Image: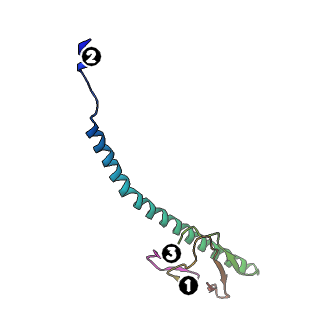
């Protein structure tokens, strides 16, 4: 019976505090990285919506309809992080100035180029 009480196994308070501190440092590093990746995915979704709207407007033009299409609401808060030029419909897009909850309208001209941003 005495042997049962003398054989104490477990973690000390100091060991537990060190583990919690290490986990806190890892979380503090991971959160900004996660937020950056989330913003990139939102911008990619917005760009895909712009390309889809352009394609829709071109199809309407080929069918003799009014060549205008709108995108769904923008997912990204801002497009200040665009690092390359994207060409859609003869226009070089370096930034999209619409903000979140805005809708972008695309109109295609006779030559297939975007005539109004």
Q: Are marks 3 and 2 in contact (CB under 8 Å)?
A: no
Task: Decide whether residue 66 is among the magenta residues.
Answer: no
- Check disc 2 and report the residue beneath it: 4
- Quarter of the image with the C terminus is bottom right
Instruction: Provide the major secondary structure of the magenta segment.
Output: loop
Farthest top residue? 1
Mark in the foreground, 3 or 1? 3
Q: Quadrant of residue 14?
A: top left
Q: How many labels were placed on the picture?
A: 3
Mark 3–mark 2 Cα distance, whole angstroms, equals 65 Å
Q: Residue at x 65, y 69 (%)?
A: 72
> In percent of the image, x 33 and y 45: which residue is there?
20
Which residues are the magenta region? 80-89
Q: Earlier in the sequence, mark 1 or mark 2?
A: 2
Q: Position of residue 74 (x, y in %)?
A: 59, 70
Q: Is residue 106 left or right of residue 86?
A: right
Circle 1 SS class: strand
Residue 3 x, y percent position in the rendering: 23, 15
Which residue in the protein does label 3 denote? Answer: 79
Q: Is residue 105 above or below residue 8?
A: below
Q: Is residue 23 left or right of residue 39?
A: left
| Residue 88 within the magenta-colored segment of the rendering | yes
Of labels 3 and 2, the one closer to you: 2
- Identified at 45% across, 77% down, the residue is 84
């Amino acid at each position: 019976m005495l042997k049962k009480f003398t054989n104490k196994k477990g973690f000390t308070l100091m060991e537990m505090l060190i583990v919690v501190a290490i986990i806190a440092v890892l979380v503090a590093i991971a959160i900004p990285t996660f937020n950056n990746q989330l913003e990139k995915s939102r911008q990619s979704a917005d760009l895909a919506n712009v390309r889809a709207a352009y394609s829709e407007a071109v199809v309407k033009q080929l069918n003799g309809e009014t060549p205008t299409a709108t995108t769904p609401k923008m997912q990204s808060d801002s497009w200040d992080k665009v690092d390359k030029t994207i060409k859609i419909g003869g226009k070089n897009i370096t930034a999209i100035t619409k903000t979140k909850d805005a809708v972008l309208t695309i109109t295609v001209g006779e030559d297939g180029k975007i005539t109004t941003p």
